[in-house]
Amino acid sequence: MDKTIAAKRKQRFLISCLLILLLFALIMLFLFALPAMRRKQEKKAALLQIQEGASTHNAFFLSMYPIGGFSEEAFHTYEGLDLMKLSFTIPDYDMFLLCLEELQRSCPNPQKLYLGLDPLLLTKEQVSSIPAMFPNTDLSILLAPRSLEEWCGIKEIDASLAAYRSITDALTSQPRVKVYPFFAQEWVIANPENYINSMELREDISLRLFLYGLFEEETRDCRIRPEETEELFVQLRQLISDTASGTYAFPDLSSWKIVFIGDSVIGNFIDRRSIPAYLHDLAGATTYNCGWGGATAASVGTQSLEILLNGLIEGATESLPEESQAYIGLSEVRSRESQESLDDPHTLFVLHFGINDYYKGLPLDAADPLDTGSCSGAMRNGIERLRAAYPHARLLMILPNHVFLFGEGTEPMGEEGHVYEDYINALTEIAKAYQLPVLDDYHQIINSEKSYVHVDDGTHPNDYGRFQIAYALMRLIADQMEETY
């Protein structure tokens, strides 16, 4: 009897083991089959979306990386395009080719085609044939904008850069094709705040890339030019190398309060890509943007350094429009800071003036060195007011950037006939006289070369230019001012 029971138990155990193995095999089979099933479903959905969209859309955006941040509404608003953005992130070339072939059948002559390509998933030969599939269509190519952090994590970095370079070379030589350099630009890839993840950009950054791609003028068109490709990749390789070695890094300025007082270069930009915001987001500084579009140093007209300082030091903001960034910024300073908190060695007042003084032809100097009716007198007067009000705080001057209007600043303006460089030289001498640290934007950052890289409209630094100014300012504060004081 005992042997019979033992045999039955053994039999049940073996059957249980077989059932468990069978169940495990079925689960594994399902798990292995699931990706193929999902891929088949996604493929079907992507092709169906293209088929259905072809009858109602005249432009398409297909991508090998997430493009959720790009708004179809923006394409309609700014380009008049009825764009269909493929909701499926294409995983490889085979699938990409299927989508292109379906588009070719369904809509052989779209008005415009945006392609998000990942060079690490493609070859030069594969992409070279794409423009021929749509010979009457303008193609805009956005290569995968890997974050700087991800670039630094790639082991085969030279091979990866070579893949990007190969795809770039293959496409920039093709007619009706524009390839954009955003994947290699610091202001995009170096700021982790721009990313949802290492391959997906936030909506506001995506919009900026789209808008930059609309420029058609030679001085503003930011597409990659074949003659500049080599320099672009040399700079990207250096950026990755410097970051990996720790040479390129954002300093810790969390102990600083930085009040920006200036013109439209400061005040016209109020989001995460403003100069003050970069110092806050990337370096941890507490920043206040008290810039005022159109402001001059000289007290001529209704917008000047003197009015800004009245608001800062005395709280007299009645002369400032409440909707202006200057009013908003000064109100924030007055509500969050006290006289004592501002009068501190780690409070920094940053002055940025001079462009509008030149544009308006205002006097450069006067008999009275503190005469606020002149640019130089107003700057001297402002510096002395700040030092008297906040004797322990520090001051820094940014020399305004090169401008590309009025013969690049060479046309004489006003009754005195001064050119732009006269104002730059005067500001330089004032900074020396008062022993102020200077960020030389005019000569060292945004100079007369490659205006389309740094400046959009002849005057104001674009995203790339503002990032360069902000990074240089971070380094100046971290490297020099901590040692000086």
Image: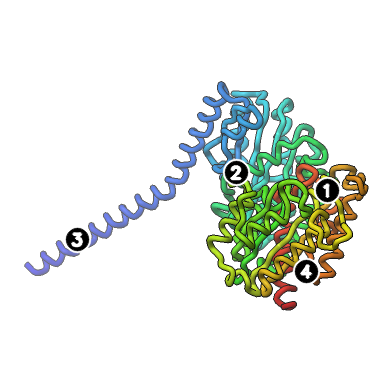
The quarter of the picture where the N terminus appears is bottom left
The residues tagged by marks 1 and 4 sit, at their Cα atoms, a distance apart of 22 Å
Quarter assignment of residue 221: top right
First in residue order: circle 1 vs circle 4? 1
Pointer 4 local density, CA inside 10 Å: few below 14, some 14–19, many at least 20: some
Pointer 2 local density, CA inside 10 Å: few below 14, some 14–19, many at least 20: many
Question: Would you say the residues marked 3 and 2 are in contact, meaning their CB atoms lie under 8 Å apart?
Answer: no
Q: Which mark is residue 64?
A: 2
Instruction: Identify the residue shown where x is 15% and y is 62%.
Output: 8
Q: Provide the residue designation for mark 1.
A: 403
Amino acid beneath label 4: Pro
- Side of 233 where 67 appears, left or right: left
Q: Is residue 464 visible?
A: no
> Where's residue 124, x and y in %?
73, 44
Quarter assignment of residue 114: top right
Q: In this orientation, which residue lies closer to the viewer: 120 or 271?
A: 271
> Where's residue 468, x and y in %?
74, 57
The residues tagged by marks 4 and 3 sit, at their Cα atoms, a distance apart of 88 Å
Instruction: Identify the residue shown where x is 90% and y is 43%.
Output: 407
- Side of 265 where 85 appears, left or right: left
Between marks 3 and 2 in the image, the one whose residue lies nearer the viewer: 2
First in residue order: circle 1 vs circle 2? 2
Q: Provide the residue designation for mark 3.
A: 11
The residues tagged by marks 3 and 2 sit, at their Cα atoms, a distance apart of 54 Å
Amino acid beneath label 2: Met
Q: Which mark is residue 437?
A: 4
First in residue order: circle 3 vs circle 2? 3
Amino acid beneath label 1: Val
Position of residue 184 relative to residue 348, above or below, is above
